[in-house]
Amino acid sequence: MKTCPNCGNQIADDAAFCNNCGVSVAVNTQPGAENTQNPNPQQGPAPQPQPQPAQGFNQAPYQQPFVYTDPKDHTKEFDAQDIADNKIIGVAAYLFGIIGVIAAFVAGTPYTRFHARNSLRISVAAILIMIPCIIPFLGWIVAIICAAILGIIKIIAIVWAFMGKAKELPIISEIGFLK
């Protein structure tokens, strides 16, 4: 018996590869010796080397990849069938204002109520945007900019509802009394 120069495992004298790590072990042959490919036919072919996983210094053999979960995404809290059946009502809550909100609340599913509440938040924010209009010129500019931002948020909400997502609205969900 001889030992593997790589891992120190005991291997047979006539083995071409280590059974443990798969490193090729040189067999001493004399000039004019017979073919040593498979000297003992009952033994079968020589074992093939097995690839070893590459590991760095002090590295765990396998680590789970980092998966980011959005804390403002509540889609997984709702039934997939509820979402599939009520996407249109969720979108209607944003498109048709108070009538869409009433329809979403009447539908009575958790998914439609979520979007109805978000639509109400947008409506309250739209009313709050009108407050700076009291101040001439500068207040009007501020109100127009805020209305444009609110319009973009509403478009985002419509797209999310159409995609079947239930996410808190950007910027508006940060306002404490609109939560």
Image (cartoon, rainbow, N blue to C red):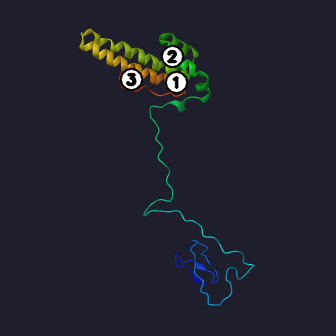
**Which mark is drawn over residue 93?**
2
> First in sequence: mark 3 or mark 1?
1
Q: Is residue 55 above or below residue 67?
A: below
Label 1 or label 2, whichever comes before in sequence order: 2
Which quarter of the picture shows residue 106? top right
Please tell me how crowded label 3 is: few (under 14), some (14-19), or many (20+) other residues with Cα within 10 Å: some
Q: Earlier in the sequence, mark 3 or mark 2?
A: 2
Give the CA separation, mark 3 to mark 1. Answer: 16 Å
State the quadrant of the N terminus: bottom right
Viewer-nearest residue: 154 or 166:
154
Distance Cα–Cα, label 1 vs label 2: 9 Å
- In the picture shown, does residue 117 fall above or below 32? above
Label tally: 3
Is 43 placed left or right of 63 in the picture?
right
Instruction: Residue at 59% x, 21% y: name it.
Output: 86
Name the quadrant of the C terminus.
top left
**Which residue, given by chain and number where applicable, does mark 3 sit on?**
172
- Residue position for label 1: 161
Which amino acid is tagged 1?
A: Ala
Q: Which residue is depicted at the point 44% across and 31% down?
A: 72
Amino acid on which the number 3 mark rests in the picture = Ile
Q: Position of residue 82 (x, y in %)?
A: 60, 25
As shown in the figure, which amino acid type bears the numbered disc 2? Ala
Q: Are marks 3 and 1 in contact (CB under 8 Å)?
A: no
In the rendered structure, the answer to whether residue 43 lies left or right of residue 27 reads right
Say what secondary structure mark 1 lies in: helix
Residue 58 image-quadrant placement: bottom left
Q: Find residue 37 and name its label.
A: none
Query: Relative to residue 58, is residue 33 drawn left or right?
Result: right
Q: Mark 3 and mark 2 in contact? Answer it, CB < 8 Å.
A: no
Q: Percent position (x, y) of residue 110?
A: 55, 23
